[in-house]
């Protein structure tokens, strides 16, 4: 992963020079949040914090970066010297990865000298938006299957570049996937990797059966055979016919994979052929253009499918490839502020989100309020949790972030705590998110000041 | 850009071991093509070849990669030793970047020992699909404006990770954009970068006017002022009021930027205020949720807008975030082959695409045929060009690829050569692409052989 501070918009640098020219280096507080929840989602899941912290900790201009900026001709020497010694000295508060969140709820807050907080905006949005999109999409797939089924990320080829493939492998695992086909994701994030064979392997052999046999010998612990290259049902019969020969050599066929055609019909046919051939233990794995709606149709048809490879539609979040999200200045030099642009007004000041749970432990409602609202922290009866927690202070990590598998456990707990209607893949009633009176009062005060 | 060979699917490695275990190292020929053109596109534009060649030239397993694979436990020592000394030794043929292409037309062909050709599949699709999506989307925006308008990529924050942002800056510039706001894209690809200020810069100041003044002093050559933070028309008046003071110091205001609300209405209002204030030279630049449809509505309304910042909808290609594309084995060991999976059958063998032009130099029709079809190369009357050209032989680049600005010139020529109906952003009749008789004959021969 690149940590180049040039992964930013040029205007961040032109603004930074402006701030420094006028000694405007007081603390700017920015919050990242989503303005609206898309109708194709009932909730969102926070992801990407680990990469944000990593980016902030490693932020440093290299000589070649400064040479490039010097040649660009917009920046003066004093500013370039400032950049040469720049590192991130701010505070970070955030919701833990895997937390379910809703519109207007900040999932990350940066409080840093405003030039620093400005510089990092672009990359922070770049990381958090994408990983949260993927975790939110992947969570819908997780909720549509049962834990005994294999749900594997097959995303790299149709991902928007390499980092999208890697981040999506990570974010989908966070949201409950079993693992990924992307080898580098296994190396970088320690998540399980999966893989068998493609059609080309079959085509390169004189016959499908010979390809199956070769594959079984080279991967005896991992015999998953792709059976749709020529004819799915014939492929299944070829598997049945080959099984005794392999068994004689101590090799067990684990599964077959279907990648085209009417998956429901084929899965029933193939199941019948396998069972009739004594291969009741052989699982059926499917792939090819899958999403939560297809998975739901398999479940509804009670199709005998044991695993799913999900790629394109998940990694591009094709039904909703971006979020209406923002990283907005909410306070500068100790004074709360907000933007009022048409249709884009935001809530001012440092905020906290408190979540209440019902007696069954399901999420009940949220309150967004000012950070120091002591009343919201202690409501009378129900269990209430603050969602935003300190992560970095003065540029240093102050907590050990959870490992990816710990974050995954937490994310799965979050999915369990969802009110049942929100678990559906069809649109449900909005989750209740209240804006507290103290926050409304602050907004009124800010507006009065700016119009006064 | 990472060149890790672990940017691949696990199945490429399991198949490779299978090929090597059975000494199947003959030349496998794979072609990359798009199966169907989405209804939201009338043509596609090839992009990403430079990055593919770069990847192939630098392909090398590092010790840490091999250690990871050894620990994974699926691979034997001989195979890992083979990987340790692996580099890419194959041939590459491709359409130049910026070429307009249509379904079933290969834009890249790899001919290499099959284990190598297999390994690189995932990353090749990952690069070519994404850059071609973006070039194809960006070309629609280019076609919707006129060359005297500024068209700037504002994509990084909503891109799917950092590489998507960089690749999109590159591919949109290729397709005719003026440049990008992404600083690192300027450094990596030598494209022009653009940037001014954000709302936070205004908010951090006590007044909008003071923010404008500070910015003008810190970027006197580049005074573009964002006027919608509080009220667009008041912002425009503040610009008018400030202009004489700046002029007194020799500073000229270049443009204002609108980022919210009804752009058409605001642009007329703002133009009136600027003109009335003697600022006829100040340009109006807009941004915020733009795409080719919005641009077309501005053109239709004759809105006085001089430039556009385009981000989210372009970088995610939001109306069509993926292509139905494939990298398929078309020949192994000198024998043509094809996959016949339901709905996914492909044309066999090494192919060439010939394009005819009419008397006005507009594209007329394409023929996809076998590579050695001498008849197709010399039709009687019309001018005919082969689109696929050699790029690498035996792992070495044999031609200098054009620079990005040369490729951009070529892409703009390609856009000029489009038949007028295809330049529209609404769906036009399909461009005629013929499958030649020799290619049909080859497919029949392959099918007969595989069923025989």
Image: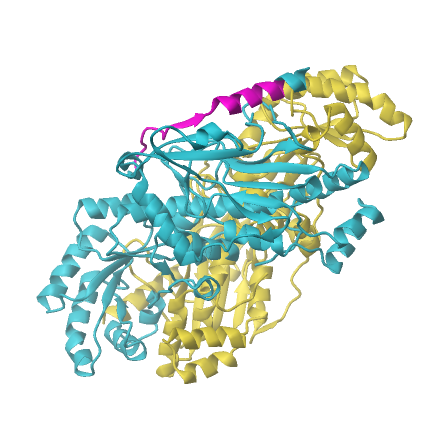
Chain colours: A yellow, B cyan
Residue at the spot 42% in from the left edge and 79% down from the top edge: A26
- A123 or B28, nearer to the observer: B28
What is the magenta range? B425-447
Q: Report whether residue A63 is seen.
A: yes
**Residue B354: x and y, percent?**
43, 34
Q: Nearer the viewer, residue B323 or A134?
A: B323
Front one among A49 and B99: B99
Q: Is residue A268 visible?
A: no
Give the image location of residue B308, x and y in percent.
Answer: 29, 55
Give the residue drawn at x 43%, y 47%.
B134
Total marks placed: 0
The location of residue B151, given as percent across then percent down, is: 31, 55
Residues A2 and A140: in front is: A2
The residue sitting at 60% across, 23% down in the picture is B340
Q: Which residue is painted at 26% across and 57% down in the image?
A: B307
Quarter of the image where the C terminus of chain A is located: bottom left
- Relative horizontal placement of residue B270, taking residue A216 as reference (left or right): left
In reply to whether residue B440 is colored magenta, the answer given is yes
Tell me if residue B94 comes above or below residue A370 in the rendering.
Answer: above
* Magenta span contains residue A63: no
Residue A209 horizontal/vertical position (percent): 76, 24
| The N terminus of chain A sits in image quarter | bottom right
């Amino acid at each position: 992963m690149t940590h180049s501070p040039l992964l930013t918009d040029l205007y961040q640098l032109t603004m930074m020079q402006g701030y420094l020219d006028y000694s405007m280096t007081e603390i700017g507080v920015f919050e990242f949040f989503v303005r609206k929840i898309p109708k194709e989602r009932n909730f969102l899941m926070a992801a990407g914090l680990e990469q944000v912290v990593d980016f902030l900790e490693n932020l440093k201009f290299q000589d070649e970066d400064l040479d490039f900026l010097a040649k660009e001709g917009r920046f003066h020497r004093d500013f370039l010297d400032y950049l040469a010694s720049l590192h991130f000295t701010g505070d970070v508060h955030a919701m833990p990865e895997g937390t379910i969140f809703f519109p207007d709820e900040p999932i990350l807050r940066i409080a840093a000298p405003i030039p620093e907080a400005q510089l990092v905006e672009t990359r922070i949005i770049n990381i958090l938006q994408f990983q949260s999109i993927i975790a939110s999409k992947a969570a819908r797939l997780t909720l549509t299957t049962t834990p005994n089924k294999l749900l594997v990320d097959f995303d790299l080829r149709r991902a928007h570049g390499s980092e999208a493939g890697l981040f999506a492998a990570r974010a989908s695992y966070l949201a409950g996937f079993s693992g990924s086909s992307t080898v580098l994701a296994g190396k970088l994030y320690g998540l399980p990797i999966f893989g068998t064979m493609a059609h080309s392997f079959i085509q390169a052999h004189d016959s499908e059966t010979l390809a199956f046999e070769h594959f079984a010998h080279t991967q005896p612990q991992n015999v998953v055979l792709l059976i749709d290259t020529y004819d799915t049902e014939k492929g299944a019969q070829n598997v049945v016919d080959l099984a005794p020969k392999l068994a004689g050599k101590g090799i067990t066929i684990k599964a077959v994979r279907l990648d085209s055609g009417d998956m429901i019909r084929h899965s029933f046919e193939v199941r019948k052929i396998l069972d009739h051939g004594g291969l009741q233990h052989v699982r059926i794995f499917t792939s090819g253009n899958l999403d939560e709606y297809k998975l739901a149709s398999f479940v509804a048809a009670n199709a005998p499918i044991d695993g799913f490879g999900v790629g394109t539609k998940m990694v591009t979040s094709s039904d909703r490839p971006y979020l209406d999200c923002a990283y907005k200045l909410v306070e500068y030099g100790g004074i709360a502020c907000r933007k009022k642009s048409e249709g884009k007004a935001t809530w001012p000041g440092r905020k906290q989100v408190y979540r209440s749970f019902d007696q069954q432990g399901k999420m009940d409602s949220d309150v967004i309020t000012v950070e120091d609202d002591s009343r919201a922290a202690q409501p009378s009866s129900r269990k209430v949790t603050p969602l935003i927690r300190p992560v970095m202070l003065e540029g240093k990590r102050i907590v050990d972030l959870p490992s990816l598998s710990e974050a995954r456990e937490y994310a799965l707990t979050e999915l369990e705590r969802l009110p049942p209607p929100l678990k559906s893949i069809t649109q449900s009633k909005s989750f209740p998110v209240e804006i507290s009176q103290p926050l409304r009062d602050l907004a009124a005060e800010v507006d009065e000041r700016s119009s006064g």
